[in-house]
Image (tube, coloured by chain):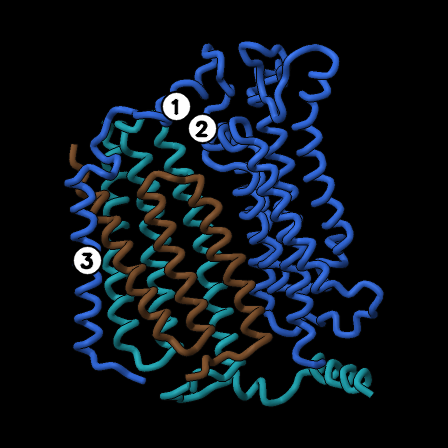
Chain colours: A brown, B blue, C cyan
C-alpha cells in the first residue's frame, strides 16, 4: 500500500505552516504575530491528526490555539505592541 | 520594510518543494510507518499486552496511550502534574493580591455586546460537557485527564472575555477555592498511587502506582464493576486518575487565566 | 439502496457543490475587496455557505449511504452538531471581530458612505457616563 493522498495532505499542511512561520518571523507587529502563531498551531494540529495521534491533537489544539494565545495577548498588553527595529 | 513580490514567491515555492521532497524521501526510505503492517519492538509489547484482558500484564484499558501514561509510567506522570502545580503556585505568588483591596477589579461589562454574551452562554455548556466526556472516557477513546482539562479551560477564557472577571468571581470561581481544588486533586492522585504500598505493608507484594493484578501481586483496583444496567469498564485506577487530573488541570489553568485577566483589566494604571 | 437514499445522496452532493462554489467566491472576495469590513463579509460567506451548508450535505450523504451500516447515523449526527455550532459561532465571531476592530480604530473605514456606529460611539451612553463618573470619583 502506498497512501499518497495522506502524504500529499501532510506536505500541503506542513508547507502552509512553514509559510506561516516565515511570515511570523518577518512580522513586526506582535499582535499579528500571535494570530499567525495560532494559525500555524492549527495547521500543526491537522498534521498531527494525519499522523494518527489524536491524543496529542486534543491537548495541543486547546493549549496552542486557546490558552497560549490568550496568555501571549495579556503579555503584549502589558508590554510593547511593536517590536523595535 | 517590504520585500519584492518575486522574492516572496521564490521563498514560497522553495518552501513547498523542500517539504514535498522531504516527504517523498521519507516515504521511499520507509522511515515513516506508512506501508508497514508489522509491529516492531516496544510497540508490539504494548499493543499486544495492554488491551488484552487474558494477558498477565494487561491494564484492561482500550486506549493504550492513556494506559501507558497512568499505569506503566504512572510515577512519571505524577511528577509532571506536580511540576505544573508548582508553576501554578509560582504564578499565583507573582500575581495574587491577598491583603490588598481590589480597587480596579474590572468592570468587565463595557466591552462586549449582547450577541457575544448570548453565544458564549450557549457554547460554554457544550465545551464543559465535551471536556468531561473526553476525561471520563479517557481509557476508551483518545483523550484523558490532561486533554479534557485543557479543553475545559477554553470555557472560562470565553466567559472572562465576554463577561469580565467579576462575573466569574461572583459565581464561586475565586482564587482560594480553585487552588484548593488543585491541591486536593494532586494529593488524591498521590494517595491513590500510594494505596498499593499500604497493601504491601500488611499482605504481600505490590508496587507503587500499581493498577490491576500482576503475576506476582494480587493487589488490584476494580476494573469491571457490575451495575443494574450492565458491566462498567473502569480500567482500574486509570479512570480515577483521569477524573482527578481533569479537576487538577482545569482548576490550575483557570486560576492562572483568572489572575492574568484581573491583571489585564487593571490596565496600565500603576 | 432505496429511492429515498439516492435522493438524499444527490441533495447532499448538490449542497457540497454549492459549498465549494461559495468557498471559491469567498476567496475571490477576500482578495478583491478594498476594505477590512468588506473582506470580513466575504470570509463570513465562507463560514456559512462554505462550511455550514456542506456539513448539512455531508450529513445527508452519510444518512443515505447504506455501505456505512449503523455508523452512518453517528456520522450524520456529528455533522449536524458541528454545523449547528458553526452556525452560532461564525456570525458571533465575525461580529466581535468587526466591533473590536472598529472600537480600537486600527483600520480606517474607507471607502465609506455612512458609518452609523461611529456616530453612535461619538456620544457616550448613559452607562458610559456613569462609569466615567465612578472612575473620576475613585481617582480622587
- What is the secondary structure assignment of the residue under circle 1? helix
Residue C117 visible in image? yes
| Residue B75 rendering spot, x and y as whole percentages | 59, 33
Disc assigned to residue B47: 1
Which image quarter: residue B195?
top right
User: Reading the chain from its start, which is encountered first: label 2 or label 1?
Assistant: 1
Question: Residue beneath label 3, please?
Answer: B18
In the rendered structure, are the residues bearing label 2 and label 3 in contact, judged by CB atoms less than 8 Å apart?
no
Front position among marks 2 and 3: 3
Q: Evaluate whether label 1 is on the same chain as label 3.
A: yes
Pick the quarter of the image with the N terminus of chain B. Answer: bottom left
| Residue A82 rendering spot, x and y as whole percentages | 47, 81
User: Reading the chain from its start, which is encountered first: label 2 or label 3?
Assistant: 3
Q: Chain of mark 3?
A: B
In the rendered structure, are the residues bearing label 1 and label 3 in contact, judged by CB atoms less than 8 Å apart?
no
- The CA distance from mark 1 to mark 3 is 35 Å
Q: Residue at x 45, y 83 (%)?
A: A84
Q: Is residue B40 left or right of residue B229?
A: left
- What is the secondary structure assignment of the residue under circle 3? helix
Q: Chain of mark 1?
A: B
- The CA distance from mark 2 to mark 1 is 7 Å
| Residue C67 rendering spot, x and y as whole percentages | 26, 27
Q: Residue at x 67, y 72 (%)?
A: B265
Q: Chain of mark 2?
A: B
* Viewer-closest of C112 and A80: A80
Residue B137 visible in image? no
In the rendered structure, are the residues bearing label 2 and label 1 in contact, judged by CB atoms less than 8 Å apart?
yes
- Please rate how many residues cluster around mark 1, counting C-alpha atoms within 10 Å: few if below 14, some from 14 to 19, many from 20: some
Question: Residue beneath label 2, please?
Answer: B64
Q: Residue at x 18, y 41 (%)?
A: B27
Amino acid at each position: 500500500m502506498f497512501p499518497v493522498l495522506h502524504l500529499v495532505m501532510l506536505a500541503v499542511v506542513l508547507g502552509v505552516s512553514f509559510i506561516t512561520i516565515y511570515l511570523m518571523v518577518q512580522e513586526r507587529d506582535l499582535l499579528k504575530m500571535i494570530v499567525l502563531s495560532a494559525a500555524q498551531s492549527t495547521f500543526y494540529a491537522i498534521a498531527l491528526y494525519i499522523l494518527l495521534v489524536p491524543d496529542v491533537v486534543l491537548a495541543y489544539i486547546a493549549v496552542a490555539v486557546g490558552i497560549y494565545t490568550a496568555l501571549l495577548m495579556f503579555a503584549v498588553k502589558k508590554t510593547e505592541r511593536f517590536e523595535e527595529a | 520594510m517590504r520585500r519584492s513580490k518575486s522574492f516572496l514567491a521564490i521563498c514560497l515555492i522553495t518552501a513547498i518543494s523542500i517539504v514535498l521532497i522531504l516527504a517523498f524521501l521519507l516515504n521511499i526510505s520507509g522511515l515513516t510507518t506508512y506501508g508497514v503492517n508489522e509491529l516492531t519492538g516496544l510497540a508490539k509489547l504494548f499493543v499486544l499486552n495492554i488491551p488484552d484482558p487474558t494477558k498477565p500484564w494487561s491494564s484492561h484499558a482500550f486506549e493504550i496511550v492513556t494506559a501507558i501514561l497512568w499505569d506503566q509510567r504512572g510515577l512519571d506522570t505524577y511528577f509532571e502534574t506536580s511540576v505544573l502545580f508548582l508553576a501554578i503556585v509560582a504564578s499565583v505568588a507573582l500575581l495574587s493580591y491577598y491583603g490588598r483591596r481590589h480597587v480596579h477589579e474590572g468592570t468587565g461589562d463595557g466591552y462586549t455586546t449582547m450577541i457575544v454574551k448570548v453565544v458564549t452562554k450557549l457554547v460554554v455548556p457544550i465545551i464543559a460537557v465535551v471536556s468531561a466526556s473526553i476525561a471520563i472516557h479517557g481509557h476508551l477513546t483518545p483523550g484523558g485527564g490532561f486533554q479534557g482539562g485543557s479543553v475545559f479551560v477554553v470555557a472560562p477564557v470565553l466567559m472572562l472575555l465576554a463577561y469580565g472577571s467579576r462575573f466569574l468571581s461572583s459565581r464561586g470561581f475565586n482564587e482560594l477555592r480553585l487552588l484548593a481544588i488543585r491541591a486536593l486533586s494532586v494529593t488524591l492522585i498521590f494517595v491513590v498511587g500510594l494505596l498499593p504500598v499500604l497493601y504491601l505493608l500488611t499482605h504481600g507484594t505490590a508496587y507503587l502506582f500499581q493498577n490491576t493484578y500482576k503475576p506476582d501481586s494480587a493487589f488490584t483496583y476494580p476494573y469491571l464493576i457490575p451495575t443494574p444496567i450492565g458491566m462498567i469498564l473502569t480500567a482500574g485506577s486509570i479512570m480515577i486518575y483521569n477524573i482527578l487530573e481533569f479537576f487538577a488541570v482545569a482548576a490550575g489553568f483557570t486560576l492562572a487565566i483568572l489572575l492574568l485577566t484581573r491583571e489585564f483589566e487593571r490596565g496600565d494604571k500603576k | 439502496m432505496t429511492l429515498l437514499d439516492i435522493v438524499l445522496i444527490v441533495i447532499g452532493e448538490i449542497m457540497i457543490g454549492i459549498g465549494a462554489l461559495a468557498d471559491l467566491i469567498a476567496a475571490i472576495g477576500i482578495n478583491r475587496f478594498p476594505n477590512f469590513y468588506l473582506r470580513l463579509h466575504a470570509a463570513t460567506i465562507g463560514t456559512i455557505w462554505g462550511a455550514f451548508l456542506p456539513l448539512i450535505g455531508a450529513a445527508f450523504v452519510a444518512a443515505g449511504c447504506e455501505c456505512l451500516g449503523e455508523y452512518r447515523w453517528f456520522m450524520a449526527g456529528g455533522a449536524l452538531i458541528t454545523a449547528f455550532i458553526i452556525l452560532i459561532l461564525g456570525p458571533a465571531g465575525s461580529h466581535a471581530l468587526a466591533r473590536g476592530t472598529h472600537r480600537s480604530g486600527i483600520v480606517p473605514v474607507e471607502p465609506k458612505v455612512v458609518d452609523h456606529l461611529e456616530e453612535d460611539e461619538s456620544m457616550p451612553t448613559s452607562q458610559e457616563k456613569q462609569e466615567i463618573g465612578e472612575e473620576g470619583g475613585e481617582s480622587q
